[in-house]
Image (cartoon, grey):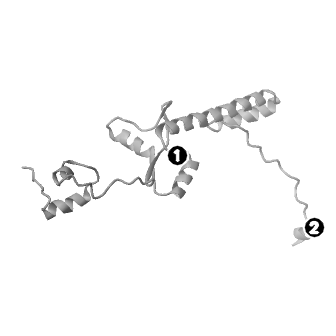
Amino acid sequence: MPRLWTENDPEGMELLKWEQFPSPMTYAMGNKPPGNPYVYREFPKLLYKAHRVAGVIKCMDPANTPEAESFSRSCTMKVNDEREQSRALESGWRPSIESAIEFLKAKEEAVSTAAAERAYRDSKMSEKAQKEAAEADAATEHHLAEIPEKKKRGRPRKVQPDSIAS
């Protein structure tokens, strides 16, 4: 059975201190304002990061399975101050799901554009250089914007006659 609070009830007055919004309790207590009004606090804040899963860009999975919950946890990060937020934003986290998806799309588009430009430059190279580029591509599963240069063998060191005799 519900309990009725009156204005003179000390327990009701104590509970009223903890109310944050106007509620039936505040109206029952003589329409008094809540004792703990809402105050906006910027932190802690939740940031989001999108991932490509099976060819589809996703951020948060609404399915109610352990795998979906684990994936959704990997898409969120709680930051407690501006320093943590700036560090997270630099590493690809975004303030909303939509901006996280757009950021990943833009990042992938930039990588594919760089790979297309490299493919065009490769078509202008010699056969030996094209073969080296194909070997570098086969060694990785990601796009390579540039082919790492092979270290050229330098001039051999001079042999000192004193070091041979010793």
Dot 1 falls on a residue whose secondary structure is: loop
State the mark number for residue 93. 1
Q: Residues within 10 Å of mark 1 (few under 14, many from 20)?
A: many
In the rendered image, which quarter contains the C terminus? bottom right
Q: Nearer the viewer, residue 27 or 80?
A: 27
Q: Residues within 10 Å of mark 2 (few under 14, many from 20)?
A: few
Q: How many marks?
A: 2
Q: Residue at x 12, y 62 (%)?
A: 9
Which residue sits at x=65%, y=32%? Answer: 112
Residue 162 x/y as whole percent: 91, 71
Residue 104 is situated, as x and y percent measured from the top left of the image, at: 55, 37
Mark nearest the camera among 2 and 1 is 1
Give amino acid for label 1: Trp
State the separation of the CA atoms marked 2 and 1: 61 Å
Find disc 2 in the rendering and name its residue: 161
At a point 31% along the width and 37% down the height, the residue shown is 64
Secondary element under disc 2, as helix, strand or loop, is helix
Quadrant for residue 158, please give it. bottom right
